[in-house]
């Protein structure tokens, strides 16, 4: 057994080759091998830490403690366990996991006498006697888990890297980079059971399996995208097929007005002037967004956005994983939804860049109101990461 100033005890490292699941576990392993426990805690301070909890207790149906301590033969002490994200087991109905920062762990241990066990049973394992003041000091030194926001993170062991599931997850990678989540993890825990359920309820009105299934199906069928957005883009696609090349904005507006009036006439109702004006204004918005996209490299010099259905398809990949993290579905069902995401995206788009421009435009039309604020710039940053990072699915996976 190895000790460091009475602060840590560790089991000898396992023999044989070992690959860290993520970059964070690699850094923990290297710090442990050096015996640099200060660096080990600095990595923990930047990591998402998870503690298990019974499903009954998490759902408020049991008043028991969130986790039961276990006896560690390594240190001969009762310990409570936290694990890092790459070490988490695949989600199962029970138990669930809650997300903690190192600062939150320090607060939990203010009156706790058990030792802290980090990643027990792995080459990363270490055991620490209660010392919340020291842990809190390390927590205050770094950026915390939010330092992962905007990064491409890959699950190198246990994550999917090839095939239709990986391709479908690649369609959701803009959101994964934005949130700093592991882009290729189907066994997804996200921000922990509580946070994931609260996010789905607040952002989507999803509170149970039935509402999750309905939302997932709506996204896979493009029902979350405004019909007006797809209408005007479809008009332009038709003009491009008819005349070839770029479509003049004035021609696009005139054609959209004619088609809108024709559709209204067929239904026995005339198109209102407000509807026509709204469509023309929308064309102007799209034109200005595309000009910015070209300047920023999201679109090629002569390219146009084909469709905004990517906005729904990309979110469908995320919704599938959110179903796993909230236990509204299992991994097998989520994988099928992700495969469908891949298929419908490939039918609609010709490349990752083609898909990405549709996703970004859909998000901007929904949120940004032509401010080119965070709703756009954070997507631009994520796009640039995915376009350049050597582990990006956009570079490691062919579109078709």
Image (cartoon, rainbow, N blue to C red):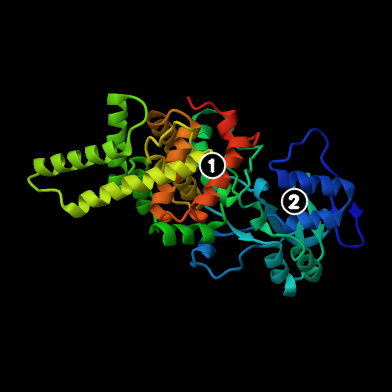
Residue 195's tag is none
Q: Residue at x 33, y 32 (%)?
A: 247
Q: Residue at x 73, y 40 (%)?
A: 20
Residue placed most toward the observer, 336 or 364: 364
- Image spot of residue 157 (x, y percent): 66, 37
Asked if residue 202 lies left or right of residue 191, the reply is left
Give the residue number, with chain letter if any, for mark 2: 120
Q: Are marks 2 and 1 in contact (CB under 8 Å)?
A: no
Q: In the figure, residue 208 lies in which quadrant?
A: bottom left
Residue placed most toward the observer, 391 or 21: 391
Q: Residues within 10 Å of mark 1 (few under 14, many from 20)?
A: few
Q: Residue at x 69, y 53 (%)?
A: 83
Q: On screen, 75 above or below 360?
A: below
- Image spot of residue 351 (x, y percent): 47, 29
Asked if residue 396 lies left or right of residue 236, the reply is right
**Helix or strand or loop: what does disc 1 sit on?**
helix
Q: On screen, 151 above or below 356?
A: below
In this rendering, the label closer to the viewer, 2 or 1:
1
Residue placed most toward the observer, 347 or 19: 347
- Image spot of residue 308 (x, y percent): 38, 41
Residue 163 visible, this orientation: yes
Q: Which residue is most to the bottom?
A: 111
- Image spot of residue 183 (x, y percent): 57, 42
Spatial CA distance of label 2 from label 1 is: 46 Å
Mark closest to the chain's N terminus, 2 or 1? 2
Q: How many marks?
A: 2
**Helix or strand or loop: what does disc 2 sit on?**
loop
Residue 296's tag is 1
Q: On screen, 100 above or below 279?
A: below
Q: Residues within 10 Å of mark 2 (few under 14, many from 20)?
A: some
Asked if residue 165 lies left or right of residue 276, the reply is right
């Amino acid at each position: 057994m190895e000790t460091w100033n009475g602060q840590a005890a560790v089991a000898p490292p396992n023999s044989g080759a070992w690959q860290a699941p993520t970059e964070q576990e690699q850094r923990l392993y290297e710090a442990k091998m050096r015996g640099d426990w200060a660096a080990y805690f600095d990595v923990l301070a930047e990591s998402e830490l998870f503690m298990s909890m019974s499903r009954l207790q998490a759902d408020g149906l049991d008043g028991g403690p969130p986790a039961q301590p276990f006896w560690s033969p390594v240190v001969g002490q009762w310990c409570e366990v936290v694990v890092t994200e790459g070490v988490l087991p695949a989600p199962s109905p029970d138990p669930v996991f809650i997300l903690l920062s190192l600062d939150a762990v320090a607060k939990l241990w203010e009156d706790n006498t058990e030792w802290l066990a980090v990643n027990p049973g792995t080459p990363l394992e270490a055991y620490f006697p209660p010392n919340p003041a020291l842990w809190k000091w390390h927590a205050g030194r770094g950026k915390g888990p939010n330092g992962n926001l905007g990064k491409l993170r890959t699950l190198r062991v246990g994550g999917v890297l090839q095939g239709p599931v990986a391709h479908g997850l690649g369609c959701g990678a803009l959101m994964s980079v934005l949130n700093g989540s592991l882009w290729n993890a189907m066994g997804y825990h996200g921000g922990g059971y509580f946070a994931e359920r609260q996010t789905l309820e607040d952002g989507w009105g999803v509170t149970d399996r039935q509402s999750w299934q309905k939302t997932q199906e709506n996204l896979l069928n493009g029902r979350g995208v405004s019909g007006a957005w797809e209408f005007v883009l479809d008009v332009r696609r038709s003009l491009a097929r008819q005349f070839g090349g770029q479509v003049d904005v004035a021609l696009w507006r005139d054609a959209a007005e004619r088609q809108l009036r024709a559709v209204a006439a067929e239904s026995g109702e005339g198109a209102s002037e407000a509807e026509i004006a709204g469509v023309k204004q929308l064309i102007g918005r799209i034109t200005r967004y595309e000009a910015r996209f070209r300047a920023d490299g999201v679109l090629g010099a002569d390219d146009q956005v084909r469709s905004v259905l990517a906005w729904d398809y990309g979110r469908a990949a995320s919704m599938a994983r959110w179903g796993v993290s909230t236990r509204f579905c299992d991994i097998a069902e989520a994988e099928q939804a992700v495969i469908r995401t891949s298929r419908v995206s490939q039918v609609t788009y010709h490349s990752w860049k083609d898909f990405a421009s549709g996703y970004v435009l859909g998000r901007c039309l929904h949120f940004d109101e032509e401010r080119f604020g965070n709703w756009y710039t954070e997507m631009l940053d994520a796009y640039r990461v995915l376009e350049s990072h050597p582990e990006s699915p956009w570079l490691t996976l062919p579109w078709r």
